[in-house]
Image (cartoon, helix red, strand yellow):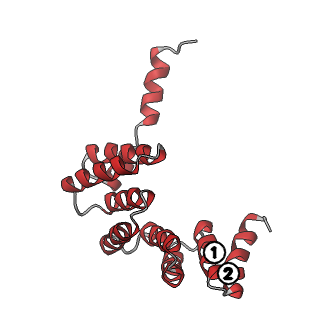
Amino acid sequence: MSINRKQRRKQKRQARPAAATVAAISRYPEVVRSLSMIQQLREKGSAGPAADLARQVLAIEPGNHHIHLALGGALQDGRKFDDAIACYLHCIKLAPQDATGHAQLARCLIETGDFPGAVASCERALKLAPDALGLHQMAGKAYERMARFGDAAGHYKAVADRTGYH
């Protein structure tokens, strides 16, 4: 069953990011499209090409923390943790009030086994986004790996209280 032209136009409009969202991410529409392509490559498991594209996009707009996040994610997918950590630290330097950089750094530090660093990053992110349940779970996981079960339980309880899942 085919759809008519009016329905296709409506689908295209809905697929485009809103102008306010695009402006918040970058002043260049090409950067926004490239970030979307980087995410698609990462979802397909193509970490290398995603990182290469992110590096090319950084040449266009080197001060954009969204691009540093995307590059860090691609590097982390490719198990290049030291490079990913450097990207996340640069992202945090560019946008210290954005909890995403702190959260991604914490996720990477957990993978490398730096649990005290992960806890510190989670705590900084939780100050910026106290209702982020994923951050509470990550902090609980890091505390649990450090055998600080009381602290872990506090974060797990925060998740359980908000979700009703115990």
Q: Residue placed farthest to the left in the image?
A: 59
Q: Is residue 52 above or below residue 12?
A: below
Quadrant of the image occupied by residue 155: bottom right
Left or right of residue 135, residue 34 in this image: left
The amino acid at mark 1 is Lys
What residue does disc 2 label?
152
Quadrant of the image occupied by residue 24: bottom left
SS state under label 1: helix
Q: Is residue 43 above or below residue 89?
A: above
SS state under label 2: helix
Q: Position of residue 45 (x, y in %)?
A: 46, 46
Q: Position of residue 26 (x, y in %)?
A: 29, 53
Q: Residue at x 70, y 75 (%)?
A: 156
Q: Position of residue 65 (x, y in %)?
A: 32, 63
User: Residue 71, can we see it?
Assistant: yes
The amino acid at mark 2 is Ala
52 vs 129, nearest the viewer: 52
Q: Residue at x 50, y 83 (%)?
A: 120
What label does residue 141 carry, if any?
1
Contact, mark 2 vs mark 1 (Cβ under 8 Å): yes
Q: Residue at x 50, y 21 (%)?
A: 7
Left or right of residue 110, residue 152 in this image: right
Quadrant of the image occupied by residue 166: bottom right
**Which quadrant is home to the N terminus?**
top right
Q: Is residue 9 above or below residue 49?
A: above
Left or right of residue 99, residue 152 in this image: right
Which badge, 2 or 1, comes first in the chain's sequence?
1
Q: Residues within 10 Å of mark 2 (few under 14, many from 20)?
A: many
96 vs 34, nearest the viewer: 34
